[in-house]
Image (spheres, rainbow, N blue to C red):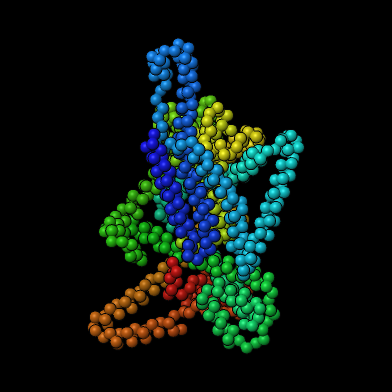
Amino acid sequence: MRSIITMSGAALAVVVVVVFFLALYLLQRYGDLRKQQRMVLLGTLLSWYLCFLIVFILPLDVSTTIYKQCVLDHLKDTSPVIQATHTNRTEASTSSHLSISIPKCEEPWSYIPDGVLPVFWRVVYWTSQFLTWLLLPFMQSYARAGAFSRVGKMKTALIENAIYYGTYLLIFISLLIYLAAHLKWRLTWTELQTIGITAANTWGLFLLVLLLGYGLVEIPRSYWLSSSPDYLLAKTYFKAAKMAVEKAEAEENLVDIMEEVAGVHESIRYNHCLRKCVDTILTKCPIEYQEEIGRNVESSGGEPSIIPTKKSLINLHKKVISAVQRHGQTQVQWSILSDQAFHLEDVTKSQSSPTRLFTHSFPATPNSQIRRFIYTPTVEWYWECVFRQWFCRLLAALLCLLSAAVVWSECTFFSTNPVLSLFAVFIQSAENQYNYIYIEMACFASILFMCVCVYSTVFRIRFFNYYNLVPHHQTDAYSLQFSGMLFCRLTPPLCLNFLGLIHMDSAISHQDRIQTSYTSIMGSMRLLSIISDGFYIYYPMLVLLLCFATFYKLGSRCLNLLGIHQYVTDDDLISDLVDEGRELIRREKRKRQKAEDGDNRRFVWRERHGAEGAAGQSRASYTEIKDNQNSPETEIKRSVTFTRRDGNIDDQQTSLLQDYSSENGSPNRRSTGGRYLSLSPSMTGLFNDV
């Protein structure tokens, strides 16, 4: 017994540690651990960690509950035998009867003692609810506030959340009074707690089904389409065309805001009481803009303009933070899309290679010596051109089967006699054989697949520029915390829905059996019969309609009609965007090749003079070359023009690709018509921050 408890404790400790590092890895990939605020990172990490922990611990709760149910059933079966033995008072007959009537029921290796899981679930659940409804919304408003002090940011956050949640609280109290008056409830603290949990889970289930219906179709389809390099390349061209427009808009917006900053910097002198606010705004601007603003102010000798108020400076501070963040995101996303396009073009060219060697347009330095010797060009050719396609197709076929099982079970889990839910059939068959390892593995694989479908949708969706999870440390604080809020609101109803699929939730299955420790903290859902017997049973069936809508891309087609372009293969406008993206990638590739050729020539020249022993002359000549390259005749300097030009942004977006041919123009300089002279920055130093 002691060894089993030790094994279960070790398993629980391993799960806790592994889940923590998983959440930390995702936060490091999407957030910036060095620059973003510690409270933002801590709140996001804690929310992700608790949600992942619930998913990993729930299978252990299921196996422990099944073991308890097994013991309880055997005790019920043996109670008549024990009574008969007491009347006969014969120990021999008692032992024989017990040995015949009590089958073997072993404890699972991961059995968790009584009293541990209820406390664990209560702490995890209420902590996640505190995060999603109170702390994270407050930190969202705090991070987006433009105030210059902590007190000002806290005041702004409190006002915004008071208005938002005050409305929710008023509606909740009104409904509570209505239900108490008409249903004649005697509301105790336990019942109020159950109503609050039910309301939160109902809202989460409403959003869960929408995201799940999209992920069940899109994830298998994405892997199936990934087996075609031509499809991936065309989609990458389409994304590049869209990203070029977004990149130009971000640069335009940044320049406009920098003009406002320059005007404020010129109007507020150093002896003014608001000068500290202006200095704070300047620290949030890119370095090249700070230098240009300083030079413009020194050269200007005109009279200062109207002095802005502190409220206008707060708004300007907020716009500067948002514009700089968006500009950095577009730069990194453009670099990532360019690399993806170059790689897919290499795959397409290497497929017809007679030597079966994979060739790169821009050879990359291997990360390690082991990778250099193992992942050779021949091995890379077989993986990229042969095995990867079959692997993606097999994985897509497996995911299709899992998606079909989830959809079938969501539509039939309310039927307990006969049992139609596939997940319930698998778990009950393992329960009859007391195979606890199979139960835990089946539960973990099932709930993990559902979580991947839901969580991947959370990482993919984008609400304009307000919510967008961007990898390579480019996600802003607002999006990180919003994702943490979504995770905390989606995970509890997801776990309850899974327990309903395997008939472990008596509020839905109406079976007389022991409840899991997780459902025990939720209270009796039967308090609201319209929720437990209606919404929780019939609303998940909507996932079937959502799967059909996702399969036929109805959402993408509707967005195309609204002017928000999505990749659809049978659309003429999308084909035009693909052609534009191909041209943009071709020009970007030529720029990189020119830059690489220049670096190679300088390296060869440097090595040649070093070999000849003319060290002093080489250094002097190389310094002269660098100076010439940094001169205006050889290198395009990034400059900021703070002169307002005529023209609107619609004309700039329409003529974006037409003006792209001016490759030697500054990225931020505009022509007299208000258009860009170039879409991309200069060749040198373009992707130094990636």
Query: Would residue 173 be found to the left or right of residue 453 on screen?
Result: right
Q: Residue drawn at (54%, 53%), measured in percent from left and top? A: 484
Q: Residue drawn at (33%, 53%), measured in percent from left and top? A: 383
Query: In what quadrant of the picture does the C terminus appear?
Result: bottom left
Tell me: residue 8, above or below residue 21. above
Q: Residue drawn at (31%, 77%), measured in percent from left and top? A: 603
Query: Would residue 516 be found to the left or right of residue 349 on screen?
Result: right
Query: In what quadrant of the picture does the N terminus appear?
Result: top left
Residue 504 visible from this viewpoint: yes
> Furthest-front residue in view?
89
**In the rendered image, which quarter is residue 289 located in?**
bottom right
How many marks the image carries: the answer is 0
> Furthest-left residue in view?
612
Tell me: residue 525, above or below residue 137. above
Q: Nearer the viewer, residue 81 or 315?
A: 81
Residue 161 image point, x, y percent = 66, 56
